[in-house]
Image: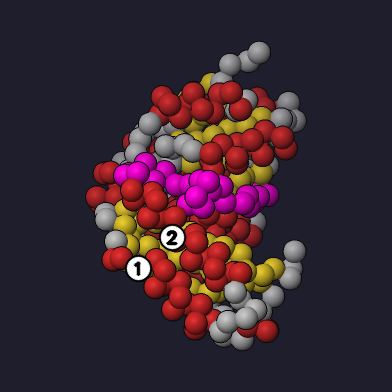
Amino acid sequence: MVLMQVIDNKRVLSSVITDWKEAGLKIGFVPTMGALHEGHLALVRKARTENDRVIVSIFVNPTQFNNPDDLKNYPRTLDSDLKKIEPIGADLVFAPSVGEMYPPGEDPEVPEINLGSLDQVMEASHRPGHFKGVMQVVYKLFKMVRPDSAYFGEKDFQQLAVIREMTKQINLPVAIIGCPTVRESNGLAMSSRNALLSVEQRIEAAKISRALFYVRDNWITSSPDELFQHAIAGIEKNGIMKVEYISIADAQTLEPVINRNGTNSIRVFAAVRLGSVRLIDNVEILNNNA
Ligand code: AMP
């Protein structure tokens, strides 16, 4: 059995990738910021079934954080992450330092993409610069890893849409594969930031997905406005959590749904503050494109 390689140097990475490419091997790539949980591992498992070689990157990307405390507090658990990935059969983990990814004086290489509405709503408007940083790091990683397929979670649905759009606009030869959100048994979407919550807070946080599932389950019989109000009240009941936004949106443009009968695919999205932690989630309401 070949053991999993752990590499922090992009030149070493590049020579491994070149060997794999020359051998005609299909490369699957899972970019992450570490503090891995079952949501990440589901992406790695899917990549494992669809490729000859699987690479996972672990890099807490400073350029996508708009809040310095969030960056500082972000959980970093490399050793236990490696122990979780190895049994799944990943071939290589790329875990570079910030200096390796962004050498001082190097062109920051942010791709020029017109994201249209994707860059105006929800996470884009509440986290200025966030998607610029996401595109920057994913573009850099794609150039280093040269994957055939890259795997992203629907948990970050807007991020998935942004990466699909970037890949399309600059014609990158990478298939972007979206994977369903993995949840705790109480419905809470798994997230590395959940590690920052107490046991009580995790129970409280389950109200977020409960509210989103309520919207989905009552979509036919209630008006969007009623559902919207119900969701906010459900999440903010007893005053522990604060809704930053809830949006019932077209799953393509991510703009709020105005004509519910004229929209083929709809999802409900939420961002919520619980103490100092910000949590996001989304649920499919309907998808007539599937
Ligand atoms: P992160 O480490 O948070 O940057 O996430 C790395 C990848 O894992 C992204 O594509 C996320 O969308 C995905 N991911 C995070 N949480 C989940 C989850 N609960 N279910 C499925 N995918 C997830």
Q: Amino acid at mark 2?
A: Lys
Could you say where residue 40 lies in the image, as x and y percent from the top left?
53, 40
Q: Mark 2 sits on what residue?
A: 207
- Where, by quadrant of the figure, is residue 15 drawn? top right
The quadrant of the image that shows the N terminus is top right
Q: Is residue 290 magenta?
A: no
| Left or right, 185 with reference to 191 | right
Q: Mark 1 sits on what residue?
A: 237
Instruction: Say which element carries label 1.
Output: helix
Residue 187 visible? yes
Of the two numbered discs 1 and 2 on the same chain, state the one appearing first in sequence.
2
Say above or below: 128 vs 116: above
**Crowdedness near tag 2: few (<14), some (14–19) or many (≥20) residues, C-alpha within 10 Å:** many
Could you say where residue 49 lies in the image, as x and y percent from the top left?
72, 35
Instruction: Say which element carries label 2.
Output: helix
Q: Are marks 1 and 2 in contact (CB under 8 Å)?
A: yes
Residue at 54% of width from left, 28% of height from top? 85
Could you say where residue 275 lies in the image, as x and y percent from the top left?
27, 56
Say above or below: 188 vs 259: above
* Magenta highlight range: 173-199
Q: Amino acid at mark 1?
A: Lys
Residue at 34% of width from left, 39% of height from top? 75
Residue at 60% of width from left, 58% of height from top? 164
Q: Residue furthest front?
A: 238
Say above or below: 110 vs 57: below
Distance Cα–Cα, label 1 vs label 2: 9 Å
Could you say where residue 282 lies in the image, as x and y percent from the top left?
52, 62
Q: Nearer the viewer, residue 114 or 108?
A: 114
Q: Is residue 179 magenta?
A: yes
**Crowdedness near tag 1: few (<14), some (14–19) or many (≥20) residues, C-alpha within 10 Å:** few
